[in-house]
Image (cartoon, grey):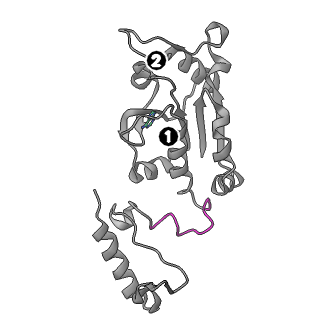
Amino acid sequence: MRLDAFTLFPPSFDWFLGQRHVRNALELGHEIRLFDYRATTPLSAGQVDDAPYGGGAGMVLRVDVVDAALEAAYASERPRRVIALTASGRRFDDAFAAELTGEPHIALLCGRYEGLDERICEHLATDSVSIGPYVLSGGELAAMVVADAILRKLPGALGHEDSAVEESFSQSLGGAPEYPHYTRPDVYRGWAVPEVLRSGDHARIREWRLARSRERGGE
Ligand code: ADE
């Protein structure tokens, strides 16, 4: 898979790119590329944003700037999924992450300031995605959240193959949150690990886990 992030702040991805599972994914042949809107802006003095029509605070990322960045990166063929990160987009969830895992090439468009010119979402992006009902100062954190949720589903990206299959909100748990986990010590300050998990009875353990997951509830 190739993941391209378009941003005004490429260094904000440094920490993410250093994470073990991200490095694993890169070593497996997946690719993450960063594109700086400023490097390809058609405007003078590196301008990328402008005041909002109709007035109001803040600056809006321009549609011509984003289009130029996409044009420079892809010339004729743009990725099948171009995802604009915006607080007003479709809420990101595990099912959407799983869907995106099947894509060979995804572009993530980060906004800054007040946001993106709406024409970016309407005409340049195939999807507008929000990671939650709050406003971030930019799309970079959201892009990393989306990229992380996708990458950890790629076979081999996590150390253990099963880890991403049965976890919170996945299909194998019917979209419900994951069951609780415990590790040693068996008892700590009188807080004991449930007996069933130490029983070695895999059928009972499975039943217990599914019941706890259901108890925690889905949406
Ligand atoms: N940009 C600003 N806020 C955002 C959010 N909640 N999700 C995605 N992108 C954003």
Q: Report whether residue 127 is seen.
A: no
Q: Quadrant of the C terminus?
A: bottom left
Q: Mark 2–mark 1 contact, CB under 8 Å?
A: no
Q: Find numbered disc 2 in the image and state the secondary structure of the residue it sits on.
A: loop
Is 160 a magenta residue? yes
Ligand 1's quadrant is top left
Residue drawn at x 28%, y 64% is: 217
**Residue 168 in which image quadrant:** bottom left
Reading the chain from its start, which is encountered first: label 2 or label 1?
Answer: 2
Q: Find numbered disc 1 in the image and state the secondary structure of the residue it sits on.
A: helix
Tell me if residue 152 comes above or below residue 103 in the rendering.
below
Estimate the spatial distance between the alpha carbons at disc 2 and disc 1, rounded to whole Å.
20 Å
Q: Which range is magenta?
A: 156-166
Residue indicated by mark 1: 142
**Residue 129 in which image quadrant:** top left
Residue indicated by mark 2: 58
Residue 170 image point, x, y percent = 40, 61
Callout 2 amino acid? Gly
Q: Residues within 10 Å of mark 1 (few under 14, many from 20)?
A: many
Residue drawn at x 59%, y 69% is: 160
**Residue 86 in which image quadrant:** top left
Residue 25 image point, x, y percent = 65, 53
Q: Nearer the viewer, residue 133 or 157?
A: 133
Query: Does the beta carbon at disc 1 come under 8 Å from ligand 1?
Result: yes
Callout 1 amino acid? Ala
Q: Residues within 10 Å of mark 2 (few under 14, many from 20)?
A: few
Is 18 a magenta residue? no
Tell me if residue 198 comes above or below residue 7 in the rendering.
below
By secondary structure, the bulk of the magenta-drawn segment is best described as loop
Residue drawn at x 63%, y 37% is: 12
Q: Report whether residue 207 is seen.
A: yes
